[in-house]
Image (tube, rainbow, N blue to C red):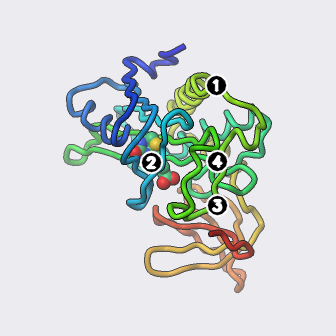
Amino acid sequence: MLPVRGLGKPLFFFAMVGSTNERAVQLAHQDAPHGAVVVAEEQTAGRGRAGRRWFTPPGSALALSIILRPKGLSPGAIGGLTVVGALAVVEVLESLNTDAEIKWPNDVLIGGRKVAGVLVENSWEGDELDFAILGIGVNVGPESIPPEVEINYPTTCVQAAVGDRLDRHELLLAVVEGVARWYPRLGDPEVREAWDRRLAFKDREVRVDGLESEVVGVVQGVSENGELKLELKTGVIHNVAIGDVHLRPVDTNPK
Ligand code: BTN
């Protein structure tokens, strides 16, 4: 039942919106409180990272955005909000006995295929964070798997892994509960540790595409600052820091 630990009150439910993140931004500007949650059955203009689209057809996915008004957090800790979203989802998927992992920085995978994504949008007033929107999208049923043309990474859905129909209402509650549990720990070392434990492709060689260059290396883990630690062929440890990095194993050929 919502609210859970201060999240989910009020709950704004829409049968159809452009984007729950966009709607949450509007509501936050209209003084919606910390903990308000926006949920939609369908998004017609769902937002993904790096300006990509996020596919949310009706009746098959989870699309939610949580309005957060963090107090007194450093910009570094605020950056951890995306991880809070990914941890919440990954734990729910673990409880369903799937081999869920986090592809750095915060895509959730099952069996190496993307099943959920997190998009945080911040609104600043000068140096102060006014609010943050934590947007989470989960592919639940097979209809939520994007059409081939929209896929930039191999994708799956939770039901394909679990082999059963799932109650999206229960999943929503469990995800919000997970966010509520991790959110107060933002900035604590245990958030990074939990992230690192779930990190996909550990000890495997990957290629990280940055905006202007690419790096190939073996994944070592997540650094204290949330960077991806790669061991290069030279033996040097190289930390990848920038937000929009596309990561995939060099030995697969998605799409
Ligand atoms: C990604 O590209 O991996 C991030 C996807 C985030 C999608 C969610 S769905 C709910 C919320 N509303 C949006 O428009 N985007 C996020």
Q: Is residue 120 visible?
A: no
Near-viewer residue (120 or 14): 14
Near-viewer residue (32 or 182): 32
- The percent position of residue 239, horizontal first and vertical second, equals 57, 69
Q: Residue at x 73, y 62 (%)?
A: 201
Are the residues tagged 2 and 4 within 8 Å (C-beta)?
no
Q: Which mark is residue 167?
A: 1
28 displayed left or right of 96:
left
Q: CA distance from mark 3 to mark 2?
A: 19 Å
- For label 3, the SS is loop
Identity of the amino acid at label 3?
Pro
Mark 1 C-beta closer than 8 Å to ligand 1: no
Q: Which mark is residue 195?
A: 4
Q: Which mark is residue 154?
A: 3
Q: CA distance from mark 2 to mark 1?
A: 23 Å
- The percent position of residue 158, horizontal first and vertical second, equals 68, 41
Mark 2 C-beta closer than 8 Å to ligand 1: yes
Q: Residue at x 51, y 38 (%)?
A: 186
Identity of the amino acid at label 1?
Asp
Q: Residues within 10 Å of mark 4 (few under 14, many from 20)?
A: many
- Residue wearing tag 2: 119
Q: Residue at x 54, y 13 (%)?
A: 1
Q: Nearer the viewer, mark 1 or mark 4?
A: 1
Q: Is residue 112 above or below residue 249?
A: above
- The percent position of residue 72, horizontal first and vertical second, equals 36, 36
Whichever of labels 1 and 4 marks the residue nearer the N terminus, that label is: 1
Whichever of labels 2 and 4 marks the residue nearer the N terminus, that label is: 2
- For label 4, the SS is helix
Q: CA distance from mark 2 to mark 4?
A: 16 Å
